[in-house]
Image (spheres, rainbow, N blue to C red):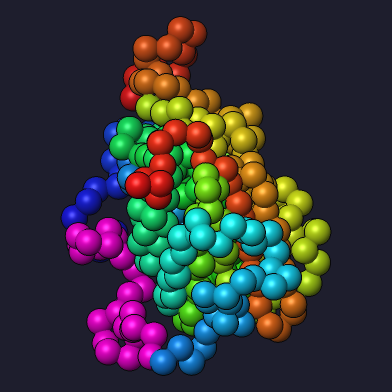
Amino acid sequence: MSHSNEAPKGHTGCPKSMDIKNEAPKGHIGCPKSMDRKNEAPKGHTGCPKNMDRKNEMRLEFDSRSCNEGFVRVAVAAFLTQLNPTLEEVADVKTALSEAVTNSVIHGYEGDVQKITIICYIVEQEIFVEVADKGRGIENIEKAMEPLFTTKPDSERSGMGFAFMEAFMDEVKVKSAVGEGTTVFMRKKIGQAYNKFDQ
Amino acid sequence: MEEYFDITGTNLTIFVPRELDHHNAEIIKEGADKLLRTHNIRRIIFDFGKTSFMDSSGIGMIMGRYKNIRFTGGTAIAIRVNERISRILTLSGVYKVIDIYEGLPQQSPGYKGGAI
């Protein structure tokens, strides 16, 4: 083990040179189609909320590097805190999100560095998370969602990704087209406690 | 540098990092396999003492190491497993092949595995 960096612990393949940096998105070139959903009523969008007044949304776009997975989890968990979730609920959302992002990194882009977009919004007491990539897509979604099914058994994938997402969230939907990419949509109701958004 | 591994006798202890996700799983996997190749290891001990997050990549890493050690006739256990990690291990079925201890195994009744 020769990893001595502190921030990303034991960081393997990340950048020293400039051409492989985590860059800020310039002018939204590679953004997913769902970009134009911003500030407008969602038309035919899977599971989107009706009550727009009470919606609070954020969007994250980042490179599909495994070292970003931790950052994304923390960001979404921080966004989630306004619903006053229990620790358990935070852990559930983090795990499910981690599965979706890992899927995009490993299966969607297969190690290539491209953009993953997360759109996360809160309506009433529910959190909605969409993880979108423009990777290779899924051929058979039903099959992919079966527990223990994996297309990469040799690289020690457990095949539990979608099973975990379904176990930890209230609802999971997958939209995918081969060669175009995959969007995973998740929803979870967070306890009934005090809600900062009401203030 | 953070130390992930300790070898005492034929025991390899893997100190699982705080967050065992895809990124960290790859690091552990690489390091552990190197040690398994170069040392005579009979038992792998996954120490979850400081772990608060794990996803299915962690399961893949554990199962992979378990297969490797089974191949040479060894065993694997998990110690200091908290409620959250226990839930993930249970959900994935890992508990069927790996003994899981909430604390140190010496403290558990019926433990016969010898000192760690």
Instruction: Name the residue at 46% across, 7% down.
Output: B109
Seen in the picture, residue B101 relative to A64 is either above or below; the reply is above
Question: Can you give x and y, in whole percent of width and height, for residue B8 in the image?
Answer: 29, 34
Residue A120 relative to residue A25: left or right: right
Foreground of the two, B53 or A86: A86
Seen in the picture, residue A194 relative to B1 is either above or below; the reply is above
Question: Can you give x and y, in whole percent of width and height, for residue A189 in the image?
Answer: 57, 43
Question: Can you give x and y, in whole percent of width and height, for residue A36 in the image?
Answer: 57, 82
Foreground of the two, A160 or A152: A160
Instruction: Reply yes or no: does residue B69 show up in magenta.
Output: no
Instruction: Name the residue at 60% across, 51% down.
Output: A187
Foreground of the two, B97 or A169: A169
Instruction: Inspect this view and state whether residue B37 appears.
Output: no
- Residue span colored magenta: A3-26
Seen in the picture, residue B23 relative to B41 is either above or below; the reply is below
Q: Quadrant of residue A79?
A: bottom left
Instruction: Inspect this view and state whether residue A22 appears.
Output: yes
Instruction: Reply yes or no: does residue A16 show up in magenta.
Output: yes
Seen in the picture, residue A107 relative to B104 is either above or below; the reply is below
Foreground of the two, B105 or A60: A60
Q: Main secondary structure of the magenta part?
A: loop
Report the label total: 0
Question: Can you give x and y, in whole percent of width and height, for residue B94 in the image?
Answer: 59, 36
